[in-house]
Each structure stands twice: as structure tokens, then as C-alpha cells.
Image: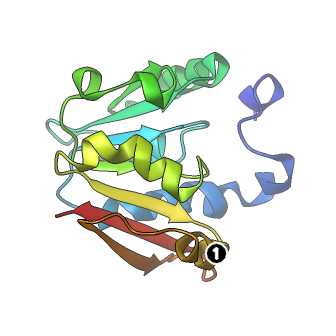
Amino acid sequence: MKWRRSTNLVSRSTLTSVWTRHIADSAQLLALAPDAKIWLDMGTGAGFPGLVIAIQLAGVPGAVVHCIESDRRKCAFLREAIRATGACAIVHAARVESVGLAATGLVGAVTARAFAPLPLTLELANSWLRQGAVGIFPRGRSIDEQVKAFAVPPGYRMELIPSLIDKTAMIIRVRIS
């Protein structure tokens, strides 16, 4: 709440449901890539899901979550939250397009929540997905329109998984074979 005054971390309309709408919704993603110790979160924003996953992985040897966020005020919040919680995360204050494998190394999972339309999300995640990462992309109620309007690229395997938190939402798990 303190940081929200200076940085719009979450919308006012979701403040009363922050634990379910944001935190629990993010926490459910870890189980969808249980072997992944190294994660990449594109457009981390207020830390959903990257910071939540980094808190869940705190204490796991070798675990780290690369949080990519271009808004410097949100990066300051993320760094303070990492310090306060002991989360295993690294903040990259940059646009996703300018961060590559050289900065992160190989990752086991790539995620993005409320980030960009599905085609752009997959395009930006492509270099990590091609190196074996699994993509975990929560999608809201518009999932049907997003999937129908999208031609799955050759070699991509997409799986729709119902959200445990929002019965009207889905999560897309993507692998490249």
C-alpha cells in the first residue's frame, strides 16, 4: 500500500482481492513447471508472477527468477521487496526486447502475466523457449478469442490448463518440440 501511492502497482479496483487475484493466481504457476529452478518473468510489474515465484523458491539451491521490468519505479519496488522477503530474484531494468540469453542464461520456465497479446508474448519468449524453457502464460477470460485468432507456429505444443483461482480463466503452457 505504501508503494502504491507513488507507483501504480495494482489498480484500485483489485486492492480488496490482491491475495487471490494477484498473489494466489501467481503462486499456482510454480506447479506447472515443477522442475524449473530458473525462471524468467517478462514485464514483471508489481511482481506478479515473478516475485511471488521467487519467494516460493527462496532457499532452493540454484533457484533464481529473472524479473524484467522497464518501469524504474516498479524496479525500485521489486528490489526492496526482494531485500525484505529474501526472494531469489534478479531485476533487469530494461525492456524485454533488450534482454537476451546472454543476460539470463538458460531458463527452465518463462512467464508473463497481463503483459502483451499472445503472439507478441510468444515472439518475445521465443529465444528462451527454443532453448528448452517451458512457457507458462496466464490468460484471462478472453482466452478463447486469443487462441482462435492465433495460428500456432510449427513445432509449438500448446496446452490449456484451467486456473485454480479464477474458474473463467486459463493458463497456456507452451513447449517447442
Query: Where does residue 86 sit, x and y in percent of width and height?
Result: 38, 30
Residue at left 58%, top 71%? 149
**Residue drawn at point x = 42 percent, y = 41 percent:** 124
Percent coordinates x, y for residue 19 in the rendering:
63, 58
| Residue 64 as seen in the image, left or right of residue 136 | left
Quadrant of the image for the C terminus? bottom left
- Marks counted in the figure total 1
- Residue 165 placed where, x, y %? 56, 74
Mark 1 residue crowding within 10 angstroms, few (<14) / some (14–19) / many (20+): few
Q: Quadrant of residue 175?
A: bottom left
Instruction: Determine the image quadrant of residue 83.
Output: top left
Nearest the eye: 151 or 60:
151
Given residues 17 and 151, the one toward you in this image is 151
Residue type at the position of mark 1: Glu
Quadrant in the picture for the N terminus: top right
For label 1, the SS is helix
Could one spot residue 56 in this view of the protein? no
**Rendered position, 31 above or below 102:** below
By what rule are the colours in the image chosen?
A: rainbow
Q: Which residue is mark 1?
A: 145
Is residue 78 depicted above or below 59 in this figure?
above
Can residue 174 be seen in this snapshot? yes
Q: Residue at x 61, y 37 (%)?
A: 46
Q: Is residue 122 above or below residue 46?
A: below
Q: Residue shown at 56%/55% (left/top)?
A: 23
In the shown orientation, is residue 43 left or right of residue 33?
right
